[in-house]
């Protein structure tokens, strides 16, 4: 409208993994579910945020201190959340190692969330970690900003964009304290 048009109108052209988004199993699994095939209830409901402190990797040993439960939505707060203001890609971002990913699979959690662009580190084990988690049919909610919330139980409100057949989609994700 600043240039005389009758209305403002934006065009959005982005990767399906831009901003906060969900990886569906199809991202790394050939016959895995696409984002529109994952039931929406997976993304909405009670969740638990755990604090990984200064850990560089989310390993099985660290995972076991959290006692992940079957069917739970588990969001991992790491030191990554302190860095959201910096406009630089962090190649050293905290991520799952294969043992941590396997522990999630073995616990049978419903949804995994992490506070950086990927559940896998840029340098090591990125594909392997995705293969383990998504191979278990567990979607991954990536690029959460958890800087403003502490560990505990919350209600998660999250709905991915409906992109039929896509291996992922952007989503807004909000948590609300359990009342
Ligand atoms: Zn992704």
Image (cartoon, helix red, strand yellow):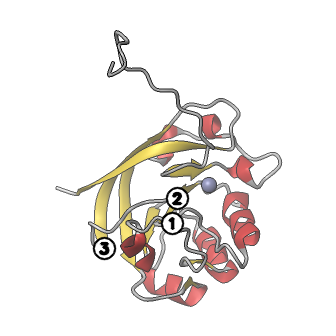
Alpha carbon distance from label 3 to label 1: 17 Å
Which one is in front in this view, the residue at disc 2 or the one at disc 3?
2
Up the image or down, 162 lies above or below 105; here it is above
Dot 3 falls on a residue whose secondary structure is loop
* Pick the front one: 21 or 42: 21
* Pick the front one: 93 or 7: 7
Where the N terminus falls, by quadrant? top left
Give the labeled residue for mark 3: 151
Q: Residue 77 placed where, x, y %?
A: 41, 73
Residue placed furthest toward the left: 179
Quarter occupied by residue 148: bottom left
Q: Which mark is residue 116?
A: 1
Alpha carbon distance from label 2 to label 3: 17 Å
Up the image or down, 91 lies above or below 36; here it is below
Give the labeled residue for mark 2: 142
Residue placed furthest toward the right: 30
Residue 71 relative to residue 165: left or right: left
Q: Residue 76 placed where, x, y %?
A: 45, 71
Q: Are marks 2 and 3 in contact (CB under 8 Å)?
A: no
Dot 1 falls on a residue whose secondary structure is loop
Residue at 61 percent across and 31 percent down: it is 163
Q: Does residue 44 appear in this view? A: no
Going from the N terminus, do you reach mark 2 or mark 3 first? 2
Q: Are marks 1 and 2 in contact (CB under 8 Å)?
A: yes
Q: Does residue 95 appear in this view? A: yes
Q: For the residue carrying disc 3, how many other residues have a C-alpha within 10 Å: few (<14), some (14-19), or many (20+)?
A: some
Q: Which mark is residue 129?
A: none
Up the image or down, 48 lies above or below 178; here it is below
Q: In terms of image quarters, where does ligand 1 lie? A: bottom right
Q: For the residue carrying disc 2, how many other residues have a C-alpha within 10 Å: few (<14), some (14-19), or many (20+)?
A: many
Q: Residue 42 placed where, x, y %?
A: 50, 47
């Amino acid at each position: 409208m600043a240039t005389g048009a009758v209305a403002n109108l934006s065009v959005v052209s982005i990767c399906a993994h831009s901003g906060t988004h969900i990886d569906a199993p199809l991202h790394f699994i050939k016959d895995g579910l696409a984002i529109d095939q994952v039931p929406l209830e997976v993304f909405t409901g009670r969740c638990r945020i755990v604090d990984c402190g200064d850990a560089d990797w989310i390993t099985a040993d660290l995972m076991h201190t959290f006692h992940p439960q079957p069917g739970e939505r588990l969001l991992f707060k790491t030191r990554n959340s302190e860095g959201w203001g910096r406009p630089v890609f962090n190649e050293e971002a905290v991520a799952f190692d294969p043992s941590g990913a396997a522990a999630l699979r073995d616990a049978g959690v419903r949804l995994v969330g992490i506070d950086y662009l990927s559940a896998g580190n840029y340098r090591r084990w990125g594909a392997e970690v995705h293969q383990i988690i998504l191979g278990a049919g567990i979607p991954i909610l990536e690029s959460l900003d958890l800087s403003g919330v502490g560990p505990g139980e919350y209600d998660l409100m999250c709905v991915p964009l409906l992109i039929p057949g896509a291996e992922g989609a952007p989503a807004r994700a909000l948590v609300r304290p359990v009342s």
